[in-house]
Amino acid sequence: MTGSVRAVVMTGPGRPLEHRRFSSPRPEPGGAVLETVASEVCGTDVHLHHGHLPGVPYPIIPGHVSVGRVLETNGPVRDVDGRTIEPGRLVTFYDVFGICGSCWHCLVAKAGTRCPHRRVYGITTSADEGLLGGWAERIEIKPGVRLLPLPDGLTAEDFMGGGCGAPTGFHAVERAGIALGDTVVVQGSGPVGLSALAFASLAGALRVFVVGAPAARLEAARRLGAEDTLDVAVARPEERVAWVRARTEGRGADVVIEASGNPAAVAEGLEMVRDAGRYVVVGQYTDAGDVTINPHRHINRRHATVLGCWGYEYTHLVRATLLLARHRARFAWSSLVTREYALADAGRALADMEALAVVKALIRP
Ligand SMILES: [Zn+2]
Ligand SMILES: [Zn+2]
């Protein structure tokens, strides 16, 4: 079949992935078409496959954060500095679009990530609308979607080693307001937790401890500079709290960032925060259930600041990407990519991600 491109389609929760052909896309005015270089497989894709997220317009082409080469634009497409992005350029893009800038959430609350018109490539875009996910040979960049050329020296593998975890972890660190010399605990050693660890270090943390699993991810955490790590599989919750307190003169950490996705981690993490410390919840991306906390002990008497963190804005993507490039040698982001899969093996990639057999998995169409 000529003039067609291959894509992987998730038709519904629990259904096998399908391999479909789409006609070769042409850009809309102000839009572009990318030749996909790499797209990520992340925990979100596992959740999508289980139907854990509401409002997903199946069938979808998964893959929300991707790198591609510009094949074609329809009219000039510019970066945020006003420079024209030419065909051949290696780019990523802000996977969120449709933030309206004129609703109550955007204008009054200034909370763009909560804009009800917000849409995300590979998550809230239907395959019936076109190639709006990265598990495909081409990606359609709709008019208004912000392209971001990769900074000089940053390879596709480096960028994808951070993947969506980089701007998400960056946002969580920003929310945490880390001060020079703070002691930080990160709960969870997936891409968001590992990114939070790296950015917390860059933000001036004295030391960052990581509580997570499995061993390969904790090893990655130590490589990224974690002061010490604890495997959740070998220590009970009260032992994990004691482990943190033993390393903080019994007081607890200045900042704890939850990036685990397990609701039980929240009650546990609040026990790890020092009096008047900060707690940021970024890992509870899907509704995994309720948990009991003690408002008196965990929050009120502790004088704690507890913050949620939803998604990321364009500013986080840009600044995180510049830091990925600047500190490429120190963190070796590409080493986080433990396995690459062809489009035909997307099902295996999902299964490996679910089993935590990989730190970061890429689809290479
Ligand atoms: Zn809005
Ligand atoms: Zn993701």
Image (tube, grey):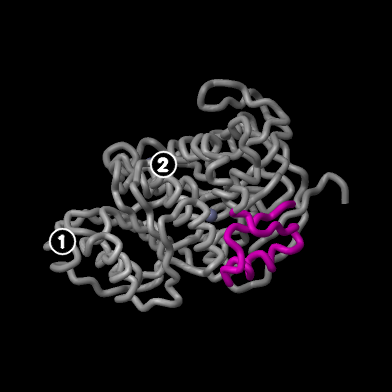
Residue at image point 50% right, 51% down = 224
| Span colored in magenta | 336-365
Please state which of the two labelled residues, at mark 2 or mark 1, is closer to the viewer: 2
Q: Secondary structure at mark 1?
A: loop
Instruction: Determine the image quadrant of residue 10.
Output: bottom right
Residue 162 against residue 316 in the figure, above or below: below
Circle 2/circle 1 CB separation < 8 Å: no
Spot occupied by residue 363 in the image (x, y as percentages of width and height): 68, 55
Inspect the magenta stretch and tell me whether residue 65 lies in it.
no
Residue at screen point 67% across, 44% down: 139
Instruction: Please indicate, yes or no, whether residue 284 appears anywhere in the rendered image.
Output: no
Q: Which residue is mark 1?
A: 302
Residue 292: image location, x then y, percent: 25, 74
User: In which quadrant of the rendered view does residue 27 lie?
Assistant: top right
The local secondary structure at tag 2 comes to helix
Q: Residue at x 17, y 54 (%)?
A: 276
Q: Residue furthest right?
A: 1
Q: Is residue 249 left or right of residue 236?
A: left
Residue hosting label 2: 202
Which residue is at a point 68% across and 59% down the rendered structure image?
A: 339
Query: Please, what is the three-letter code of the amino acid marked with disc 2?
Result: Leu
